[in-house]
Amino acid sequence: MAEYSPDKRRGFMGSWLEFGTLGGYVLGASLVTILQFAMPEDTLLSWGWRIPFLIAGPLGIVGLYLRLKLEETPAFQRQQEEASKREAVKTPVLRLFGENWRALLICIGLVLVFNVTDYMLLSYMPTYLTTTLGRDATNGLVLVIVVMVLMMAVIGLGGRLSDRFGRRPVLFAGCLGFLFLSWPALKLVQTDSAVLVFVGLLILGLVLVTFTSTMPSTLPALFPTIIRYGALAIAFNVSVSLFGGTTPLVTESLVAWATRSGFAWANDIPAFYLMIAAVIGLIAVWFTKETANAPLLGSGPAVASEEEARELVEAYADESSEVAQSEWAVEYAQSGPIDIVPPTSSKLAPEPEPLAAK
């Protein structure tokens, strides 16, 4: 029988999400760099700083329009239809979250290491180069921009690797990379050589690609369809707000405190911060279930032809089959019925009758 797996390119396709994010960072940082280079400091502080906001306004409207036009996934639409049919027997939201507390904690841990490392490199490093090391602000931004462009060039490869070898091995590699390479990379950044500074930033950037290319396909797979949107939104935003977004401020404060206290290792604090985040990430990845080449919770297996659909239905109807005993068949029960085609049908019906999950 044909393998009952979903699209095996989910990791590669998901990596394009962060490709777009990096593209936005590059455009924003490039605009700021151009303004710093073209305007006197007094002019920039007087009114020039408004230019990026004036440009971002129309882009935000375009983004809102595109978001409103996006269609929901078939699995989510099916959940909404089923929910409307059983309004009287809804499962309480708190109970649904309570049953998935472990996935919530794992998600918070994964988002922590992802965003701490992301904010450290893309947001704090230009400030670190300028404020702490006394380097030229424009040069620091240019180096980070080049690193982000190179990250965009290889991010698809990271997604493909996660599809082939699994999400967990790629994420493990990223956590180990930050654990063992953060300090050597920061030492290169602290040198007076522009080339070595770039190499240090590039090392951090390439390790970060393991997260940017894999997290978009890893995080949604932690939750069943019925609570995926809400659970992921809560866990992601709580973790980003508490740990990711505060990274530049906390790191800068720690560096300033250690410097005032006369500690020789004050300038190495960003590396220590990354290493602590990497340890937390390793723990989270350890407890993460491998989801590469497996259906999302609440989503049925994907097929490429009518023949595969019939084979899948026949196998699912056989309680002793691999399909019927699979983890998907058991866990899908959390998300409602499965829309499949009866095995006796000569062709795919336009509106198949749902068959209750086991």
Image (spheres, helix red, strand yellow):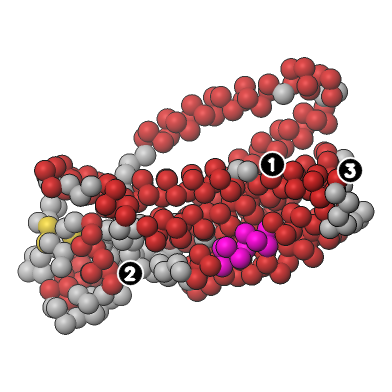
Please report the bounds of the magenta region as a residue range: 274-282
In-image side of 182 versus 239 (left or right): right
Q: Mark 3: which amino acid?
A: Gly
Question: Disc 2 on helix, strand or loop?
Answer: loop
| Viewer-nearest of discs 1 and 2 | 1
Give the residue displayed 42% in from the left and 45% down from the top. Answer: 233
Q: Which residue is mark 3?
A: 134
**What is the number of the mark on residue 100?**
none
Residue 217 showing in the rendered view:
no
At horizontal 65% and vertical 47% (from top left) the residue drawn is 247
Residue at 36% x, 47% y is: 229
Q: Position of residue 355 (x, y in %)?
A: 11, 61
Residue 168 x, y percent position in the rendering = 50, 70
Mark 3 to mark 2: distance in Å? 53 Å
Mark 2 and mark 3 in contact (Cβ < 8 Å)? no
What's under tag 2, amino acid-wise? Ser
In the rendered image, the vertical position of residue 332 relative to residue 50, given as above or below: below
Q: Nearer the viewer, residue 285 or 188?
A: 285
Q: Which residue is mark 1?
A: 249
Which residue position holds label 2? 5
| SS majority, magenta | helix
> What amino acid is found at the position of numbered circle 1 in the picture?
Leu
Q: Mark 1 or mark 2, which has the lower sequence index?
A: 2
Question: CA–CA distance between discs 1 and 3?
Answer: 18 Å
Asked if residue 32 can be seen in this view, the reply is yes
Q: Could you say whether the residue bearing mark 1 is in a helix, strand or loop? A: helix
> Residue 257, relative to residue 271: is it above or below?
above
